[in-house]
Amino acid sequence: MNQDVVSAISEVIKSKNIDREVFQEIIESVFLKAIEKRYGQSDNFTVIFNIDKGDIEIYAEKEVVEDDEVEDESLEIPLSKARETDEDIEVGDEFVEVIDHRTFGRRLILSAKQNLIQKIKEFEKRNLFEEYSTRIGEIVIGDVHQVNRFETRLNIDKTEVVMPASEKVYNERYRRGQTVKAIIKEVRETNRDPEIVVSRKDPSFVRRLFELEVPEIYDNIVEIKAIAREAGDRTKIAVVSNDQRVDPVGACVGMKGVRIQAIVRELNNEKIDIIHWTSDRELLVRRAMQPVIPLEIIFHDPEKRVTAVIPDDQMSMAIGRRGQNVRLAGEITGFTIEPVKDSEYYSEELALADVPELSPAIRETLFAAGYTTAEDVLDAGLDALRMLPEMGEEQGRNVLEILGNYFE
């Protein structure tokens, strides 16, 4: 028994997490490759690797020919040489020759070694890709070991994963050695090792945190119907109970708020609005607009657009920072929500929500800037409009022309 070889094999199998049978196949394929390099083909060769003894046995099936008729040594064997092993063998018989791999020469053995290393690396890559592909959507914990403006790299179970800047929460800062939770979002095949992409920004990260923290969600007693998130600032989550005895919002909040507080801490104090989901679309819109309570909800069927009449003193809260509250409420309900002050809606002024020629995106931009009526926009003029995000001078002129037509 070659004890050194067996010990080395055991160490490789353990450290690389390779199945014994798979390792055996890798060794055999490597030596078949070496045989091809030496003889030009390997169809009549058999390689048997005894993983317990660390022995390699190579056999070649050859045809017995007369001593002076050998044309291909890899396929034929002279009669005299065959009779050294079997005295009764005749020309035309099949002979199984035992090949000593040590006769391959140093170059072929070195090539086989390099091929073995490559095969093991390929196995590791495939194994890593398959393992993490099945873990997409799972929350993992890693230690930060590299941070730059483009990405943050973490070590998870001796595996390096990457959090691109696009998957990082904008107001979070990481330092080397810090422990970070994230969700496995994607596994990409590359020319080198598979790239495992994790995220703290994706809404599914919040979903998984709720599943881990709220047993009723994990057990499907409480169901998450929708999530809308602007990472680092605010998340709205709509939940419903499959058991009338269980309050879905109360289950998510927990006794004295212990469950929601744990999630908020993990999200670095990101605001979370938990909404009791309902199939009543008007009630759902009202709940989604929290913390404000609209005075009236007007649906503009068949468009997926609604006008929410808001008390004047709650208008800035309804819109939220940079239009965040109304935008998230729209995402979670599936409607474009256009807030209007009650004093303007019930006056004779023209509300932007009542101008169908304006696209939802333009209306949202105007709402976020604090404009709710046509008069507000016209009074502001082109200089103010062209400074708005995604507006520009040409778009601003177009908006003023549309609104101006209503007062001709």
Image: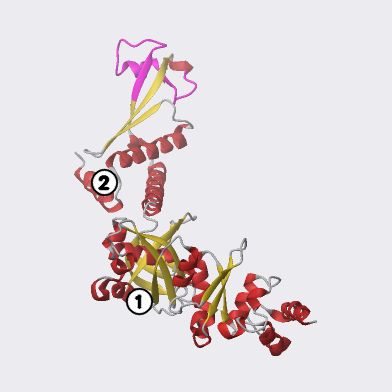
Q: Tag 2: Cα neighbours inside 10 Å, few (<14), some, or many (≥20)?
A: some
User: Observer-nearest residue: 258 or 177?
Assistant: 258
Q: Is residue 7 magenta?
A: no
Q: Which mark is residue 176?
A: 1
Q: Which mark is residue 131?
A: none
Region rendered in magenta: 70-97
- Residue 50: % across, % down: 26, 35
Whether pointer 1 and pointer 2 mark residues with C-beta atoms closer than 8 Å, the reply is no
- Residue 137: % across, % down: 39, 58
Q: Amino acid at mark 1?
A: Arg
Q: Report the quarter where the C terminus lies.
A: bottom right
Callout 1 secondary element: loop
- Residue 193: % across, % down: 43, 56
Which residue, as the protein is rendered here, is positioned at the far right? 408
**Residue identified by numbered label 2:** 9
Asked if residue 168 lies left or right of residue 175, the reply is right
356 over 368 or under it: above or below: above
Residue drawn at x 21%, y 38% is: 52
